[in-house]
Image (cartoon, grey):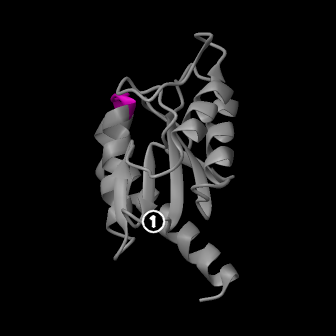
Amino acid sequence: MTNAAQDREVRSRVETALRQLSVLDRHLLAHDANERALRHRFAVHIERHFDHWDVDCEYDLFTADPARLTELERGLVIAVIGKPLARDTFGLSVFPDIIVHHRKTDDNLLAIEVRKSTSPIPIEVDRAKLALWKEEPLAFRYACLVRLETGEGGASPYSYEFV
């Protein structure tokens, strides 16, 4: 598969999973469910479209140099709370929300950050995280920022961009 064909294929699969989320999980979006619940449901839909790949949420078992992860944490300071992201389970993590990869290898296809329209965190933080995950040593081939419109009456239930 050529790079252009693979680009189209990855984007198409993400778009299809987002359409499924917006239809099958509309109740969660309409009622402004917790972002973690939305991420999980999106990961379920993503998994259906990436056969032979592992799909994980908040994956923290990378074999990357721990110093590099510490560098990422220091570099991604959230202006709202004035402290770096951490390797924690509280949702403000240096790790991507969802990844498509092959476990125990360096074959990293897609890193995804998911954010609700009501998130107080500046969108630049998510873009910066994704840009860093595309760099060595993990070098994800694709990085996607997904914005989910929550609450009733949104014009479109989602938007996304590849970083």
Q: Which corner quadrant of the image does residue 33 belong to?
A: top left
Which one is in front, 130 or 115? 130
Q: From the top left corner, tell me how far across and down residue 92 is, in percent.
A: 47, 25
Q: Is residue 80 magenta?
A: no
Q: Main secondary structure of the magenta part?
A: loop
**Near-viewer residue (68 or 152):** 68
Tell me residue 105's x, y (percent): 43, 66
Looking at the image, which is closer to me, 119 or 102?
102
Q: Is residue 33 magenta?
A: yes
- Residue 101 picture location, percent across and down: 43, 64
Which residue appears at 40% of the width and 50% of the height?
22
Furthest residue to the top?
81
Mark 1: few/some/many CA within 10 Å (<14, 14-19, 20+): some
Q: Secondary structure at mark 1?
A: helix
Q: Amino acid at mark 1?
A: Thr
> What range is drawn magenta here?
30-35
Q: Residue at x 54, y 24 (%)?
A: 85
Front one among 155 and 94: 94
Q: Position of residue 159 (x, y in %)?
A: 59, 48
Please say if 46 is above or below 92. Answer: below
- Residue at 37% across, 63% down: 104
Residue lying at 66% horizontally and 15% vertically, measured from the top left: 79
Relative placement, left or right, of 57 versus 111 is left
Q: Quadrant of the N terminus?
A: bottom right
Residue at which label 1 appears:
16
* Residue 11 vertical placement versus 85 (above, below): below
Residue positioned most to the bottom: 1
